Image (spheres, grey):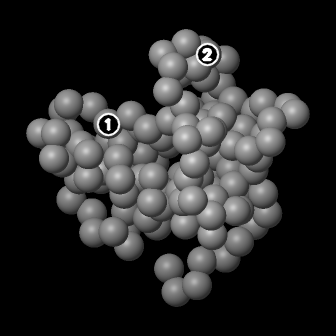
Amino acid sequence: MCPLYRQNRLRKNEEFQTIFKKGKSVANRQFVIYLLPKEGQDSFRVGVSVSKKMGNAVVRNRLRRLIKESIRLRADEVKSNVDFIVICRLPAVELEFDAFQGSLYHCMRKAKLFSSIHKEEGK
């Protein structure tokens, strides 16, 4: 388990737009993930997007923190040669942390973001 460092974050609008245009997307009811493989990259980079439709700033920031924490907990298992964006959908607002995390990991597995297949214990 390692922290989600600043170098692991996507910040610039151009980076987001490149991933949206050139990358592929995977979705479930709660999340959409856009990903773009980047060869020769030392570590993965992630961007998080939560729309104003999700609620006020408190709700949106909570969702961002939950997404970042969920990714941080499994950061050592995420492929290093990929940039991806996680977009939160409205049904995710009502989920408890365990269900939220499970749904995000499900979407990440569909996107083949984990370096090897890991089985979730008890989930």
Mark yes or no: residue 86 visible.
yes
What residue is shown at x 57% (from left), y 48% (from top)?
Answer: 5
Q: Which callout, 2 or 1, points at the residue further toward the start of the chain?
A: 2
Task: Determine the residue located farthest toward the bottom in the rendered image.
Answer: 122
> Going by the image, does 36 lie left or right of 89?
right
Residue 15 on image: x %, y % = 58, 19
Label 2 sits on what residue type? Thr
> Going by the image, does 64 lie left or right of 13?
left
**Quarter residue 105 falls in:** bottom right
Circles 2, 1 touching at the beta carbon (< 8 Å): no
Residue 108 on image: x %, y % = 59, 52
- Residue with the mark numbered 2: 18
Reply above or below: 61 against 103: above
In the foreground, 35 or 2: 2
What residue is shown at x 48% (from left), y 16% (from top)?
Answer: 13
Cα separation, mark 2 vs mark 1, equals: 18 Å
Query: For the N terminus, which image quadrant?
Result: bottom right
In the foreground, 113 or 39: 39
Label 1 sits on what residue type? Val
Task: Determine the residue located farthest toward the right in the rendered image.
Answer: 40
Reply above or below: 60 against 92: above
- Residue with the mark numbered 1: 50
SS type, badge 2: helix
Mark yes or no: residue 26 visible.
no
**Quarter residue 42 falls in:** top right
